Every structure is written in C-alpha cells, then in structure tokens.
Image: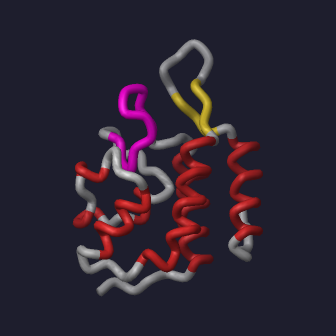
Amino acid sequence: MHKLPSAQEVFDIVVNHLFTQGRPAYDGVQGCMYRTHDGLRCAVGVLIPDNLYDPEFEGDTADCVIQKLFNKDLADWREHKGLLLALQEVHDECFVILRGTSAYDFYTTALRAQLLKVAAKFSLEYRR
C-alpha cells in the first residue's frame, strides 16, 4: 500500500502543480477533467498515479474517485477528502477563458486568494 502523505504535503503538491501548470485541466466540451488529452491535470488528477488513472474517472465527482482509488491499493485518501474536495473546487472555479480564443488560463489573483482560504481552513501553511 502506498504511504499517505500529510495534509501539508498534499496541499504543497497541488499548489505547486497548479501554478507550474499555469492553466486548468479543462476542455470546452467536457469541462474540468482529471486529465486532459494534452496532459493537463487538475488538483486531484495530479495526485493519481499513472498506473491507477482510468479515463472512466472523467465525469465522476472527486469523492467518487477517492473511493475508487482506495479500492485499488492506495493509502486511505479519504482522510484528506475535505481538503481534496476544497482544492478541486478551487481548480474548477479559478480559471478564465482568454479573450477572443478557446484557450484557458488561471486567474492567478483569485487562485492565490482561494488557496490561502483553503490553507487557513485546514490549518496549513501557504508557502508560495
């Protein structure tokens, strides 16, 4: 069984991923996705090991994916369920469609503000 990271480790991984990737895992047809066809990953998608990702996850709630992954020999991620759901919500709400294009980007001011709120809610340190 994989070792469960701490809540702080999960938060740090997701925050660094979102700012490094710079845009959401979103397409104009399916909306927010765990993984897009061009390799983008959402806040929960970045935590799913390649060997456990299943395209069938697309369209499922994060809660449902957490349950499915626990049944596939991952550590009990249900311990971080509230944090994961909050981070997923931040991912899904803090993007903008770039004017005059079909491209998407993060609204970084809103992203940072929402991540600070998540950090405070879960007693975590925002290190970015």
Q: Residue at x 72, y 52 (%)?
A: 114
Name above or below for residue 107 compared with residue 80. above
Task: Pick out the residue farthest to the top.
Answer: 100
- Dominant secondary-structure state across the stretch colored magenta: loop
Q: Quadrant of the C terminus?
A: bottom right
What colour scheme was applied to this rendering of the protein?
Answer: secondary structure
Q: Which quadrant would residue 40 be assigned to in this image?
A: top left
Q: Is 85 displayed left or right of 59 in the figure? A: right
Relative placement, left or right, of 77 versus 109 is: left
Residue 32 vs residue 100: left or right?
A: left
Task: Look at the picture and state if 59 lies above or below 64.
Answer: above
Q: Residue at x 43, y 57 (%)?
A: 62
The percent position of residue 98, horizontal first and vertical second, equals 59, 23
Report which quarter residue 74 is drawn in.
bottom left
Image coords of residue 109 (percent x, y): 76, 43
Q: Is residue 38 left or right of residue 79?
A: left
The region drawn magenta spans 26-36
Is 32 within the magenta?
yes
- Image quadrant holding the N terminus, namely bottom left
Q: Residue at left 39%, top 86%?
A: 3
